[in-house]
Image (cartoon, rainbow, N blue to C red):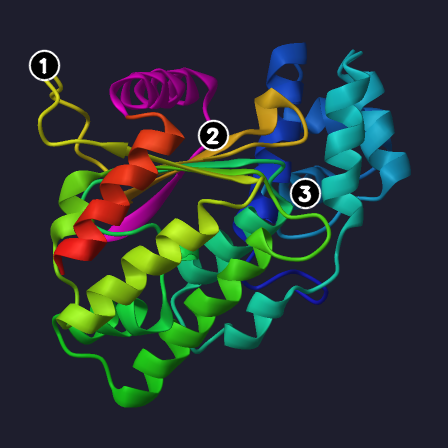
Amino acid sequence: MAGLRREPTARQLRLGVELRRLRDAAGLTGREAATSLGVSFTQINQIESGLTGVSEKRLRRLAANYACTDEGLISALVAMAANRAKGWWEEYRGALPTPFLDLAELEHHATSLREVQFLHIPGPLQTEGYARSIFSDRIPELPCEELELRVRHRMQRKAILEGPAPTPYEAVIHEAALRIRIGDRPASRAQLDALLSISEAEHVTVRVIPFDLDGFGGSWAAMMLAGGAVPRLDTAVRDAPHATAFIDSEAQLGVIRTLFRRVGAASLDPERSRDLIHRLAKEL
């Protein structure tokens, strides 16, 4: 159908999900919502599926019809609906897997970012050499053109940590990730040096979970928590064996927040973390 999105982004899908949740909370069917708005049921379905956009006027009418009085949430949803500008990641559409684009878009709009990694340095903190080694070791082997696209995309993700208004970013990294040699010795040393450098930035916090910590089983799964304009719009990201999962249900977000608190409590403070990274760099 003309005018419909062929492949809604994760952010567009999330807007539709939140509008459907408001409707469900109000106890209205899609047809009842359509009648109250003066549109067809098909239009409501398309909005909730992320296949088409929604104007601020209609979104606010829907919120009123759903008896939603949370102005913070409504304003955040309006901002999501109104921001239709295409970001830098769109140049990779059709060239890289969609989750790469959705992750970059999520990071771009996040009010804060927290990340836990056990086996690799987090993506936004990786050097070009480290990233290239990561993608070079992939099985099946990537064509050279796609490998370079992935490296360039990963380097562009660093934009969230740069500029006049960088995103507050916290990374908790297990000592294993610091010791695993990705690439050769010079590349590994360069990565640790870069990590030390970025950890000095005011908006970046790097914490390390040491090997010699007693009683830490950990979750042993990489995860990210992207802060939304309001807590309800937080999004968690977890890597699965064959896909990247974007998590937005409140129950699952509660579990993720608990896991972040646990790994945060198990990690060294930033100063001791830098001391450990510095010592490991000197050993290379």
Observer-nearest residue: 119 or 195?
195
Q: Secondary structure at mark 3?
A: helix
Q: Position of residue 111 (x, y in %)?
A: 63, 36
Q: Rounded to the nearest whole Å, what is the CA distance between mark 1 and mark 2?
A: 30 Å
Q: Is residue 177 left or right of residue 85?
A: left
Query: Does label 1 or label 2 sit earlier along the sequence?
Result: 1
The residue wearing badge 2 is 248
Amino acid at pointer 1: Gly
Pointer 3 residue: 47
* Labels 2, 3: front one: 2
- Mark nearer the N terminus (3 vs 1): 3
**Residue at 60% from the left image edge and 51% from the top image edge:** 108
Q: For numbered disc 1, what is the local secondary structure?
A: loop
Residue 173 x/y as whole percent: 27, 39
The image shows residue 115 at horizontal and vertical percentages of 38, 38
Residue visible at 67% across and 16% down in the picture: 28
Checking the image for residue 170, the label placed there is none
Magenta span has 245? yes
Mark yes or no: residue 27 visible: no
* Snapshot quadrant of residue 74: top right
Return the residue at label 1. Answer: 215
